[in-house]
Image: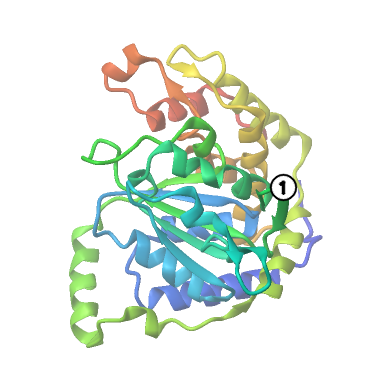
Amino acid sequence: MEYNQRIEIEEIQKGIAQIKNELAKVIIGQEDFVNLLLTALLADGHVLIEGVPGIAKTLTAKLLAKTVQTGFSRIQFTPDLMPSDILGTTIFNVKNQEFEFHKGPVFSQFVLIDEINRSPAKTQAALFEVMEEKQITIDGNTYQMEEPFFVLATQNPVDQEGTYTLPEAQQDRFLFKIIVGYPSFEEEIKIIDTHHKSKTDKPEKLVQPVLSEGDLNKYREIVKNVIVDDPVIRYIAELIYKTRNHTHIYLGASPRASLATLNAAKAYAVIQGRDFVIPEDIKEILPSVLRHRIILNPEHEMEGFTEDAVIKLILESVEIPR
């Protein structure tokens, strides 16, 4: 089947290329990581980033935020952090004898949450409403977040000391869970060499804004119109349905995962230069969509199976539409 381009995506491609060029001034390698971050950004979804300390998780998130002219805030999660430290609090103003709401750091557009699993469930639950509905309700008053609203959260592997497992409902609010690994040997050499030659302790100064918030909102609207044929929609449904009756999986993915796969595939297709989704787009983004949304059976987990391994089995078991 031949496709003629039916949606104007050249402007988005140009903007994405500019962001990549800015990030490449500091970030070495990590091409898949950057592509997934940009996919989530275009798909209007939040991202959970997991990896050991020191592999530029936080730095990459900060630099991505800097490439777009939007509000930015960073919240360091700690065991003693309270919900009001994130959302804000109501304070009595003695001068006018009225209560006033003082907004917390989550009232921004790009919100970076560093080490989200360092705080207990009570604090993590403060993010439920704002991540899903882009609003906060406090003392009976509802406050809408300004668009675009994008949450990037980093976490260290949960087996490290002093971390809390994120509740399933919290994890489900992230479009992606991206696993960031160590760089290759050649990339390590380039990282050291680039740092040596840059002569700066503040690499973020090298990165400049290339998009406005208006540009990003416009791109997101265009991405919604990316073409998805019926066989591809059926392919997504079959993959997600398989998670609910797979022998290795205790808890499968919900319809929210189906919608997340659809939205992410549309954005990924645009980044690849197409105005339509193909099965390969879905295969690329599915592990990041599902790995935090399924729970393995304990016996298979003890046998060494991982979420990614089971997702691979599911992909291999579903026929690809032609």
Q: Residues within 10 Å of mark 1 (few under 14, many from 20)?
A: few
Disc 1 is placed on an element classified as loop
Looking at the figure, which quarter contains the N terminus?
Answer: top right
Which residue occupies 46% across, 29% down?
311
Position of 291 relative to 33 (above/below): above
- Report if residue 175 is visible in the image: no
Q: Is residue 100 above or below residue 261?
A: below
Percent coordinates x, y for residue 257 in the rendering: 61, 34
Residue placed most toward the observer, 106 or 112: 106
Q: Is residue 255 above or below residue 65?
A: above
Q: Is residue 10 above or below residue 178?
A: below
Left or right position of 270 against 289: right
Q: Nearer the viewer, residue 116 or 225?
A: 116
| Residue 292: % across, % down | 46, 35
Residue 320 lies, in percent from the top left, at 61, 31
Q: Quadrant of residue 193?
A: bottom left
Q: Residue shown at 39%/48% (left/top)?
A: 116
Q: Is residue 147 left or right of residue 281?
A: right
Q: What residue is shown with label 1? A: 140
Please give the name of the residue rendered at 24% of the width and 65% of the height, measured from the top-left corner. 187
Estimate the x, y position of residue 107 in percent, counting from the top left.
Answer: 59, 63
Q: Residue at (42%, 15%) from the top-left corner?
A: 248
